[in-house]
Amino acid sequence: MRINFFSKNLHKENKTLKLYIKNTFGFIPKNIDLYKQAFLHRSLSVENKENGHSLNNERLEYLGDAILGAVIADFLYKKYPMADEGFLTELRSRILNRNQLNKLSKKLGLDLFIKTKDCNLFICESIIGNAFEAFIGTLYLDYGYAFTQKIIIEKIIVAHVDIDALATTNTNYKGKILAWSQKVKNKIEYKLSEEIIINNRKQYIVQLFIEKQMIAEGCDYTIKAAEQNAAMHACEILEL
């Protein structure tokens, strides 16, 4: 099924997206409209005139999440033949956690194609990671599992993720900030700034203050996760 998207610059948009995908991932999309849907947030849903359903990237995100989990599990199982279940599970979680997917999506440039009106992508970074998963779901529908697996491993994981470094990296950003603050004797404080609704789910925006100065903020579906996101941004700013 092809989806009709109406735009004055439709041809230009299609050409730009096709060129990006070819240059970044090395293949040409068969159904470009499906890839455009992968970047379409619920807030800008398009009605499918064939069945009256709203078209956005939520179902593609669900599919991509499952595909990513299976591909990464298989990759790690083969890469670390002597590792136990706990190590493999933890490392898969680190590779596929929301912060990592957000960063990976930005590194690949996927965030540049997202269409949304709900909120600032800098704050609501979960939208960026969701689009990444939706892109993978689209790739699976367009080319099948074997091809999708090849792209994920060769063009994304091997090219952009240092697996061995991630396996030994401390991802407890709140712990890093706390240890740093105690060392330099600076007071840190997390404050809930705002509660917003994205995709009918509440998200929390938390700001991190150091010596009463707002340094960074994070957004996620729980306050604890939002604090962790804010701490991650602070670690990047402070180069910890």
Image: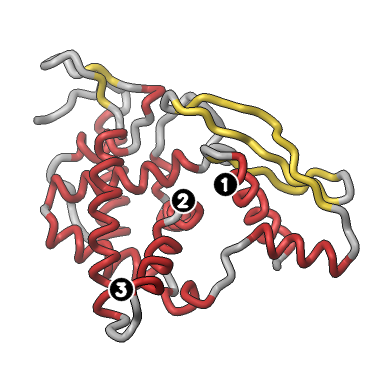
Mark 2 or mark 3, earlier in chain: 3
Per the image, the residue denoted by label 1 is 225
Structural crowding at the residue carrying mark 3, measured as other residues with C-alpha within 10 Å and reported as few (<14), some (14–19) or many (≥20): some
Q: Amino acid at mark 2?
A: Arg
Question: Looking at the image, which residue is at 51% across and 24% down?
Answer: 197
Lateral position of residue 96 relative to residue 212, left or right: left
The quadrant of the image that shows the C terminus is bottom right
Pointers 2 and 1 in contact (CB under 8 A)?
Answer: yes
- Residue 227 spot, x, y in % from top left: 65, 47
Looking at the image, what colour scheme do you see?
A: secondary structure
Per the image, the residue denoted by label 2 is 98
Nearest to the observer: residue 173 or residue 136: 173
Q: Amino acid at mark 3?
A: Leu
**Residue 214: quadrant of the picture:** top right
Per the image, the residue denoted by label 3 is 76
Structural crowding at the residue carrying mark 2, measured as other residues with C-alpha within 10 Å and reported as few (<14), some (14–19) or many (≥20): many
When the figure is inspected, residue 91 is found, relative to residue 105, above or below; the finding is below
Q: Nearer the viewer, mark 2 or mark 1?
A: 1
Question: Looking at the image, which residue is at 30% across and 73% down?
Answer: 76
| Structural distance between the alpha carbons of marks 2 and 1 | 9 Å
Q: Amino acid at mark 1?
A: Ala
| Structural distance between the alpha carbons of marks 1 and 3 | 25 Å
Pointers 2 and 3 in contact (CB under 8 A)?
Answer: no
Question: Looking at the image, which residue is at 33% across and 64% down?
Answer: 156
Lateral position of residue 179 relative to residue 15, left or right: right
- Residue 213 spot, x, y in % from top left: 85, 45
- Residue 230 spot, x, y in % from top left: 65, 48
When the figure is inspected, residue 210 is found, relative to residue 89, above or below; the finding is above
Q: Secondary structure at mark 1?
A: helix
Nearest to the observer: residue 64 or residue 43: 64
